[in-house]
Structure formats: C-alpha cells, structure tokens
Amino acid sequence: MLKYENLMEKLDEQVESILPCQRVDLNRDDYGGFVIDGVATPTSVSMVSTLGQAYLLEGGKYYQSEDILARILAATTFGRKIRRESGCFDLITTNFDSSPDTGFLVKAIAPVVRAARKATTYGDKGAEKIVEALGEIIQTAVPGMVAGGFHTPNHRWVLVGALSQALELFPDLDGMDTVEQYLAETIDINADGEYIERSAGVYNAICNRSLRLAAEALNRPELLEPVRRNLDLSYHMLHADGQVVTSFSRRQDHGTRVVLGNMVDSYYSMARQDGNGFYAAVADWLYSISPGAGWILEPFLTHPNWREDNLEREVLPKSYTKVYPVSRLWRVRRNKTS
C-alpha cells in the first residue's frame, strides 16, 4: 500500500541524489544551477520542486532545513540569470525561448508555492522566501507562456495546467483568455480514452496530470472526465509486470519497455477525489514495481489530509477481454499472459 511515511524515505533519497548536482560555488557563472550531462541546463530549475517538497513536507529528513532553503534560493538565482527576456526558458537540446518547456517548469513549482504560501500562515519565514523567489519565476514566465504557443498536442494541456495554477496563485496576471482559447479547442481524447498522441509510456501521464491540476486550480471538475477515461483504458494496456503497451504510440516511446510509474500520481489523486478503490489499488501496484518520489508527492503536498489513508482497495482484475473500437484495440489478459 502506498504510504506517506514510505514516500518521505524516497524523498530523502531523491534529495540526496540531487544535491551533488547543484553548483554551489558563488564564483561560477552557473551558480545555483543543476548539472545534467555536464551542463547546468535552464530547465533543470524545475528540480527545485523536489527541494521545495523536502522543505515543506513534515516527516522527512530535510523538513524546514535551512540548507535546503539556501539551495532553493540559489536555484532561483540561476533561473533569473538564465531565462530569456520573455521570462521563458530553453530546452537546450531542441526548444529555445520555449513556452511549453517553461510550462513544464511552472507546473512543477506552482504546487510548492501554493503549499509554501499556506505554511507562511503558521509563521514559517523560510516559506515566505520560497513564495517570493519561486513566485517571481512564475509571474515573470506567464507573459511568455501566453505569447509563445506550443509544439505538440500535450503541450496545450501543459500550458493550460501551468497557466491555471499561476493564475490561481496570482489572479492579477493576464492569461485566462489563453486558457479559455485552448480549452475551447476541446480535449484531444476519443471515446475509448486515448489521447491523440497515443503515448501510453510518456505523454498520457503528462496530459492527465496537467488536466487534473487545471481542474483543481480553475474549479472545473469536468476537466477530470478525460483523465478518468484514460486511467480506465490505461489499466487494460498493462502487462502483469506493470509494463504498458507502447506499440501504437505516435511518439518516441513507441516500442519501448515502460513501467507506468509516471501515472501513479494521477491514479492516486483520482482515487482520493472519487473515493475510488480501483484507482487506489492500481496506484499501489504500480508504485510497488516502480517506487520513487517526484510527482507522486504532489497530492500529499496539496492535500495534507490525504496523508492519512483509509480508502478500501478493490481487487484488481487479472483476467479480462476489452475491445476499444474507436482505437481499434483488442486487449486480452489471462493472469500473467496478455
């Protein structure tokens, strides 16, 4: 069973893997950045979300740590220095002055800012500094995200999720017209629950996460319907070892072997919102195969009351036949064979 206490152990481990990657020499031009493949990349600023979780979540080794706070502030110093005039960041391998990649970053740090703002009401002075520093990154990024457009279908929902959270935090910002325009295009999901990219290994999880974050920030529960539809389909695309079928993907996960750990946060969040024991059981199962921290901690950061979990789990079916006529898929599983 997925337990908050176990997640705290994984969070501590993740923090300890991140800290050596950060440049802490004040004399370096890339001070505060996180080094990936030898380079402190602009979008690596999103790694500060893990440090923010560590500072804000009780029960972890780094809760309210002054060292972690200093690391967060150093990362924002790097972010302010490396971003473009538009407020956007580069994905240095391919996308420059990129609104969608900035959306990924904002979407990751916005839950930290929301939780930090709550912590300030209890007198946490470090949380005030987090709100100010990360909040500035978000506010400065919004105009660039509004103006910059997107490259791929899932980017639309990344931007909707990022802008929705930014506007919830800072209502005076301009950006709601863009959110409404993107939503007016309708969600690119069919009756079976497949998004247009058909990316079971990567982008389905991103779409689900973006839409549920937008649903909460905008108070629009109707945005959760496509999430449920995809979660229902995704279970039937899983093999007995937790790997998902990727042979029909239109993206780079085509034909790859992927355990669906990136969907745990959405299964768990929807389980708690709906009181759904099936989704909770899927989250437990996938996490048992692919444990970690990262996005799975967001539901607990946003909803502290979820740290106590008495939701009864359903028994997951291990034998079934499912036909998805619109997607032209026929899935059969008999115990360990599928």
Image (cartoon, grey):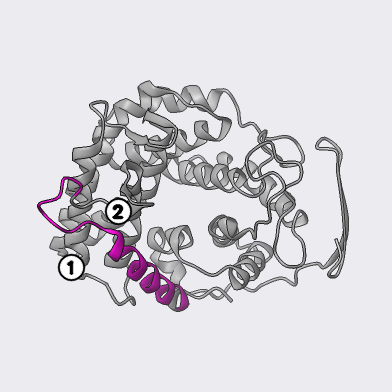
Q: Amino acid at mark 2?
A: Phe
The picture quadrant where one finds residue 96 is top left
The residue at 86%/65% (across/down) is 337
- Mark 1 vs 2, N-terminal side: 2
Find numbered disc 2 in the image and state the secondary structure of the residue it sits on.
loop
On-image quarter of the C terminus? bottom right
Q: Position of residue 65 (x, y in %)?
A: 20, 70
Q: Residues within 10 Å of mark 2 (few under 14, many from 20)?
A: many
Which residue lies under the disc numbered 1?
Answer: 67
Q: Is 12 within the magenta?
A: yes
Q: Position of residue 189 (x, y in %)?
A: 67, 35
User: Viewer-proximal residue, 33 or 158?
Assistant: 33
On the picture, is 236 further left or further right than 17? right
On the picture, is 292 further left or further right than 23? right
Find numbered disc 1 in the image and state the secondary structure of the residue it sits on.
helix
Numbered tag placed on residue 34 in the rendering: 2
The picture quadrant where one finds residue 293 is bottom left
Magenta region, residue range: 6-30
The picture quadrant where one finds residue 94 is top left
Q: Is residue 186 above or below residue 284?
A: above
User: Viewer-proximal residue, 70 or 2?
Assistant: 70
Q: Is residue 121 visible?
A: no
